[in-house]
């Protein structure tokens, strides 16, 4: 691949509507039909043959044949011993911060009493059985274990299963194990890919069936989650996952080397990651191109980043206000406001997964340890959904408690509406009680 | 159809696991393949031909050809004039109660400042463009208009579109219009069925494209929502909708005529509605059967109810505690606790859409005017999702603001984790800033 010179540059005001749509289009998703068929076959096999299918698929795809998928106490202990004190401390610190931010945002039950004998409430319950997926393909992701385990624990889910692919030596990544255990999650299975999703969605002799599945993954994992969410008797899922993406809005005062590093830290996730840079300052766009070229020379994963950058763009806009409009239309997973007055622009943000204000908030902080969650809406889903949080692991149940004087107060309203809607048994269920109250 | 004599009676303790699963199985969904193909064709037509397709499909399925789908001011005014004062008052009262309960449960933005130069926040934004569907097939449902419009308004959604099928005379149901207008929703389109969903999901010249769609509907509407939620460039949806269902747990002290009326008010929704009655008292089960037979003789929609009752069951359990276990496993949309100490049993409820405590809280109150929402999870989705509420119309966005001393405090943690995960550009994005801060 040739050396990087510059991001594809567009000028927003010169584009017509069709060109604007094209400029903000996400890279096309992968060969969906092939993946879908392969995943469907895997789901069927696991549903039919359970653990036997998991063993065979694990041998084929992870290159290791395991008798027992569950991580035992000795493996947890070995993980703790093996990890450097510095890494343990980092996982602990990130876990504390994630826990503190997520705990502060937990919903509370509430009640509304109308004073006439009717009391309505909303109570919260943990989802009983949740399944977490922590990838370990190109690299194991202990940070993802924290992002999923911490809110699940805060919600109080009684059964939390975590699947993560085994290494070639048959062990799970020690940092992932340490992160899970630090949140009190000890039911960890060495299972990866679509078969892990299938095991948690349908249940096998080893792995309990889950009500809802969480976590990022490769194209197979994502497709498996999509398919089980559609199946009768499958499991719900957290978010429709797509490739990761960042949109940066930078003004003339932004530091080009910081912006370049932020774009590259998104681009290194994968060749289908998308990166957009918006600025009203052409010199800044030039400077960022130069810094990207410079930094690429230092990066081991430069090939991946170059592929992602080839599909990425820098867009010259007339003003920061125009940039905010483009961003709201794109609805990025990550939005970096490398602006002199970033805080003042926050009210203009209508749709984004997570926002980073100013020069000192690189996306990488949110990925690891600011305290916010890094499982976020991609592919424009930020228009209608937020990232994973404690409420993602809870169900809200409404309740009504009615005294005899309460039905006397509001029963006639229900009778009137039931009559208008032609629902006679509804009317009768209220009218019978009204008669009794009157009697 | 022969006269009703009794619900199919089962004894839970006598059933093996397979029989228990069968006892709680929802009635099979309708001929999915036919419906799916028909709906897919409708979606494609509307996507390609916009308003022309809507006109033609409206003429075919709603029996009325409209030039203009939008409801004008004159039609709103006529609706207000035509409605009886009693019905207007009932809609107003229900709207006030729904508004009060939903407003009391709104999420708030929050911030967590760790005191070391890092501040994390969650801010809330309304979903910008929402589409509401209010059925008017067997009967128009002004109550559903309230249940959707009220939380959308409370969330502050700037663009709210509502579709409801036209009557044969080309007008919308006046009660639906009055309910919508009472919530400030005046962008109402006379469109029904899968084509209404398509119009809101893709946009046409008349109807703006929406980010998220809400509301119940028949099998075509439900399938259309399912399909647009899966399409690239489609719209998100509120809940996977299935036939309505109620589970009643009644003890020996319950009033059989109330229980029978509650079961029938569920059964009259449609032939695929499901009704389950659980009791530890055989005499109560017998008495309810007798009351159902009696009440059926008074009901205009008795045929529909009889069909639903044929697929419904009464289950004798050993104890109320056993009934709670069965209910949590079934995860009903509506759960009526016709128990002497209903409040004491509430903590045992793990999964249900909405719960009705005691003898004086018929489901019909929740359908209309207790204040809770009647758009609720069906088909067991209550295991992982709650009903529609204000948050359903909002997105939560996380934010991080970091001072130079903030990155000095937590940057090393991110560097350590990025190194462990082999994400070198992530490490670099933080390390570059740490150098600057130290300099």
Image (spheres, coloured by chain):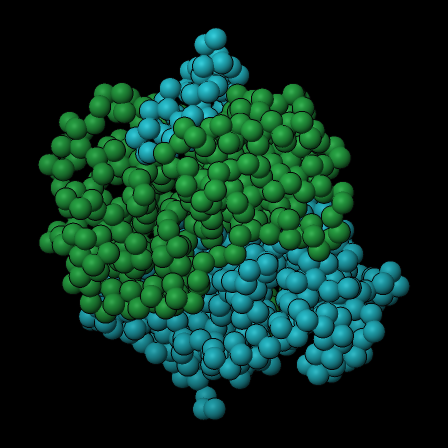
Chain colours: A green, B cyan
Q: Position of residue B202 (x, y in %)?
A: 66, 63
Q: Quadrant of residue A423?
A: bottom right
The image quadrant where one finds the N terminus of chain A is: top left
Q: Residue at x 69, y 30 (%)?
A: A282
| Left or right of B317 in this view: A64 | left
Q: In this orientation, does residue A183 appear?
A: no
Along the viewing direction, whichever of B306 and A86 lies nearer the viewer:
A86
Residue projecting furthest to the top: B439
Q: Residue at x 13, y 41 (%)?
A: A72
Q: Residue at x 42, y 15 (%)?
A: B409
Q: Residue at x 53, y 16 (%)?
A: B403
Along the viewing direction, whichever of B167 and A198 lies nearer the viewer:
A198
Along the viewing direction, whichever of B410 and B422 lies nearer the viewer:
B422
Q: Position of residue A378 (x, y in %)?
A: 51, 47
Q: Quadrant of residue A255?
A: top right
Residue projecting furthest to the bottom: B2
How many numbered tags mark residues here? 0
Residue projecting furthest to the front: A2
Q: Position of residue A175 (x, y in %)?
A: 25, 33
Q: Position of residue B255 (x, y in %)?
A: 44, 64
The image quadrant where one finds the C terminus of chain A is: bottom right
A109 w.r.t. A87: above or below? below
Along the viewing direction, whichever of B403 and B190 lies nearer the viewer:
B403
Q: Quadrant of residue A223?
A: bottom left
Q: In this orientation, does residue A62 appear?
A: yes
B129 w.r.t. B63: above or below? above
| Left or right of A45 in this view: A276 | right
| Left or right of B59 in this view: A307 | left
A345 w.r.t. B70: above or below? above
């Amino acid at each position: 691949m040739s050396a990087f010179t510059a991001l594809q540059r567009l000028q927003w005001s010169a584009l017509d509507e069709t060109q604007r749509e094209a400029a903000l289009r996400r890279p096309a998703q992968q060969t969906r039909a092939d993946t879908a068929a392969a995943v469907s076959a895997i789901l069927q096999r696991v549903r039919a043959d359970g653990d036997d299918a998991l063993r065979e698929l694990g041998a084929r795809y992870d290159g290791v044949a395991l008798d027992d998928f569950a991580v035992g106490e000795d493996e947890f202990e070995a993980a703790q011993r093996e990890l450097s004190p510095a890494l343990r401390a980092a996982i602990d610190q990130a876990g504390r911060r994630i826990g503190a931010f997520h705990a502060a945002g937990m919903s509370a039950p509430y009640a509304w009493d109308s004073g006439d004998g009717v009391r309505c409430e909303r109570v919260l319950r943990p989802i009983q059985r949740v399944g977490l997926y922590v990838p370990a393909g190109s690299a194991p992701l202990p940070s993802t274990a924290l992002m999923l385990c911490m809110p699940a624990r805060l919600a109080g889910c009684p059964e939390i299963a975590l699947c993560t692919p085994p290494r070639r030596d048959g062990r799970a990544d020690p940092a992932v194990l340490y992160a899970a255990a630090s949140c009190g999650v000890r039911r960890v299975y060495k299972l990866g890919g679509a078969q892990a999703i299938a095991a948690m969605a349908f249940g096998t002799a080893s792995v309990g069936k889950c009500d809802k599945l969480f976590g990022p993954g490769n194209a197979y994992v994502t497709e498996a989650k999509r398919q089980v969410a559609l199946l009768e008797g499958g499991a719900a899922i957290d978010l429709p996952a797509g490739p990761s993406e960042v949109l940066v809005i930078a003004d003339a005062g932004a530091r080009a080397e910081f912006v370049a590093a932020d774009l590259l830290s998104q681009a290194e996730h994968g060749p289908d990651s998308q990166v957009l840079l918006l600025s009203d300052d052409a010199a800044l766009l030039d400077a960022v191109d130069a810094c990207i070229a410079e930094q690429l020379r230092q990066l081991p994963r430069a090939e991946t980043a170059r592929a992602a950058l080839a599909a990425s763009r820098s867009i010259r806009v007339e003003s920061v206000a125009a940039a905010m409009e483009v961003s709201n239309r794109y609805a990025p997973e990550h939005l970096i406001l490398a602006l002199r007055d970033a805080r003042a622009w926050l009210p203009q943000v209508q749709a984004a997964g997570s926002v980073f204000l100013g020069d000192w908030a690189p996306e990488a902080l949110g990925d690891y340890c600011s305290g916010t969650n890094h499982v976020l809406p991609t592919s424009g889903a930020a228009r209608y959904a937020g990232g994973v949080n404690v409420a993602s692991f809870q169900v809200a149940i409404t309740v009504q408690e009615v005294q005899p004087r309460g039905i006397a107060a509001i029963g006639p309203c229900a009778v009137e509406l039931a009559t208008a809607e032609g629902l006679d048994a509804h009317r009768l269920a209220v009218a019978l009680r009204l008669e009794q109250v009157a009697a």
